[in-house]
Amino acid sequence: MPNYNWPPMESRRVMGKRVTRLDGIQKASGKAKYNSDVRPAGTIHGVILHSPHAHARIKSVDTSAAEKLEGVTAVRVVAPAGTEIQWAGAEIATVAARTEEIAHDAVRLIKVGYEVLPHLVREDDLSKAGSRAKPAGEAVTGDPDAAFKQADVVHEGVYGIPVITHCCLEPHGQTVAWNGDTVEYFPSTQNVSGIGGDLAKGLQLAAGKVHVHMDNVGGGFGSKFASDLWGLEAAKLSKASGGKPVKMYLDRNPEQTIAGVRPSVYAKIKLAAKKDGTFTAWDSTSWMTGGFAGGGLNADLLPYVYRQVPNRRINHTAVSTNNGAQRAWRAPNHPQVSYITCSALDDLAAKLNMDPLEFFIKNANLTAKPDVYTSQLKKAAELIDWKNQWHPRGDKRAGVIKRGLGLAVGMWGGAGHASQCRTNIHPDGTVEVELGSQDLGTGTRTVIVQVAAESLGLPMNAITLKIGDNSLPVSGASGGSTTVGGVSSSTRISNLNALEKLFEVVAPGLGVPPDQLEAVDGKVQVKGTPAKSLTWKAACQKLGVRTISEMGANDQRNPRGLNTGGVSGVHMADVSVDIETGVVKINKVVAVNDCGLVINPKTAEGQVYGGVIMGICSALMEERVADEGTGRVLNADMEFYKLAGIADIGEIVVHMDITPEHDKRGVVGLGEPATIPTTAAIANACANAIGVRVPTLPLNAKNVLNALNGRRLA
Amino acid sequence: MSSKKEPGVQAPKKGFSRRGFLHGVGITSGALGAGILEQEAAAAPPVNVTGLGEAPVTLTINGKPVKVNVEPRTTLLDAMRDRLEITGAKRVCDRGTCGACTVIIGGKVMYSCTVLAIDAQGKDIQTIEGLSNGNKMHPIIPAFANNDGLQCGYCTSGFVMASKGFLDRNPNPTYEQVKAGLGGNLCRCGTYVGIRKAVLEAAKELKGGKNA
């Protein structure tokens, strides 16, 4: 059996290098094809009729006028009379027509009778939730009541982080053709290997009947794993239209309303410390909504990272609201619990008159990795010049612009998912690496080819990579930051299995046993003896007419040391706040993250830049505004659902903890941990600047000025 | 400042469905015009589009005339994507906010989701597809790739076009000008750090005259 271990850090030729992403030119020249660009011959268009009401019973659906419209090929009722609608935007009917314009006209001709029912769409005030609130019970560790009595300092606060949306730029949807007994399926997905079976199940077809194709996806962030109702409907519209391909993507309003959200979290938190800053007790009563199902929040994560506090009481309530359902959102739970925990800890430090950096370091023994957090806190502090720039809460300098620093912590798993890879070595020397995986823009293509080039001793351009098709070897969905660990490990194993077969063929000619050969610099040679070698091409010619095709799998129960999970991170922010306008400006964010063995520092840093920017968006701008009056989302668009622009992000400093200690852990995912602590760090920096906590995000002018006014009134 | 800030291309205010609005306007066969294009309209060749339903028009895209059947309400973006297989420009917000559909019309950087196809007749329309030809490409393209100014890539075509238009107007940009000049485009993956570097690198490359 080959030795699958990663080559030693110092001898890697391709891995660990700052390689430019392989699809960069394709994407930057507009040539990269997304499935929303794909229109096979004869494509027609699907459009969905959505409910305008948040809660209603369908009395009647009359599609006769729509069916008669010229150009319409199929009309389907999704929610027949008697159906109870539980959120605005819910699908009522679908139409396929020759053009999208005609399909929109047809949707407008559908007459729906609604019996409008009472709704609840806001959860920020728990007292209004009534029976819609479902408490999850209490969890207690230690003796929190006694600890609060004995404490020198107790702080109580209320914190909130609202529902936000994924806001994928490529909307959810697909082009799909159901012709005969097979389905050609072009979805926008994070799950190439799995989504075909999901659609097949809904269509009551054998899983193998659905063929999935996807070269590129325009953002998913956790919201694009399943085929969804629109996938099923598009397939059924295609069948009803004689098998013509149906292109059906959500318009922006439903994309922002029903295609997934991140749940909110609100919490009343009481916490205590000794005079010397030792954190002793935590008591939180939190609530949230993830839509009609109530949704889940893992409150057991509290207090986040500092979970080993000896005394804790956790109460958590999920509120069922008449809103579109939650979906996994980049690091589910973690940004929210990082925000409420790190805000409360920062307030406690302020009450202790203690520098929060000192407080977070002093209590590092309450984390699972005291040494890692301590060193990351110190590194981030150095990069943001905490020692010279930090001041006690409230910038006392004259003027209306107040400046402050804040910090927060995060953690994540990120071990590799189950993944299979096939390596083909042909007699002409060409090499194919095949996985049913996907590149979300994280650089997956590039890191796979780096691993293959490293493992086979070839230049990167000698490797042909095939992904994005469910007829390729099964590889996991891209969620949980599990992709890079999974695909790098399966690629490595598959490559070396194929190489072993090649060595068996070549070894006799070189006069040594196969295990004395190595593949380096485009040659197969006797280990350490370049003089006794064959070029790669000459070696492959020895295969005659046989192609080597070998599999490799990442087994999650035994990843062979190639990948692992468990990472940490510390982010720090420097902000300026105008106390007259309430505008918060980012000066700088420092991100210190470890992620084991880094295959490509350039794209890894890109993940952290992106994670930090998403954290900035959530801290300063993002909030899904549900209107209790109409039951609808008021900002289901991109002008009132705000994202940061290129001028809003300040300076971002990324420090990847690339060290021999982290490297020997193997590959770990990074996409999610990179975004977790940013939001809380900014919120703490704002509190440090203006001297008062803005309890509820985002830090927009309204919330900042309300907090400042509260202080003035007090 | 981006020319996209000109009043004529602003999306209708909240509460107003742009698609419904365009549908209504379509009945008057473009008589209402689309603001920014009005001045140029005087010089444009006569156009025969009447009533509802599709009619043939000729658009000049990347220097080549292309015939396409469109309805009066069909946006330039939808005409390109759904009828001409020109798919570099993406449909994201579909109401003049995000910039993913950015093209350059008559030298002006514009959102193609807020331009009617019938109003784009007689204009020189440049799309991302016009910035490369085989291995020859505008320096902004390799600059985006080299500086990792993209991830999922769905905003990228629009950003590249906005950057190209910005560099046409600002051949010697400062870092601060780059930040102000590209404020009309949004990215969800968070690639702005690379984009800032890419635009400055492309400016340098263009000044070198290697790709004039």
Image: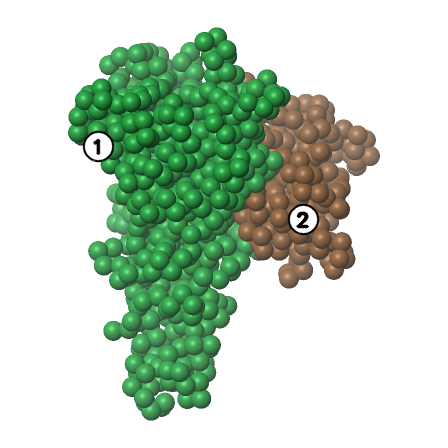
- Percent x, y for residue A8? 38, 68
Q: Name the residue under label 1.
A: A310
Please say if B161 is above or below A602: above
Between tags 2 and 1, which lies in front? 1
Q: Would you identify the image quadrant in which residue B93 lies?
A: top right
Q: Which of A239 and A297 is in front in this view?
A: A297
Mark 2 residue element: helix
Tag 1: residue type? Answer: Pro
Tag 2: residue type? Answer: Leu
Q: Let me know if residue A71 appears in the view.
A: no
Q: Colour of chain A?
A: green
Q: Residue at x 33, y 30 (%)?
A: A277
- Percent x, y for residue A668? 35, 53
User: For the view shown, which residue lies furthest in the right direction?
Assistant: B43
Q: Would you identify the image quadrant in which residue A449 lies?
A: bottom left
The mark found on residue A36 in the picture is none
- Percent x, y for residue A453? 44, 68
Q: Would you identify the image quadrant in which residue B82 lies?
A: top right
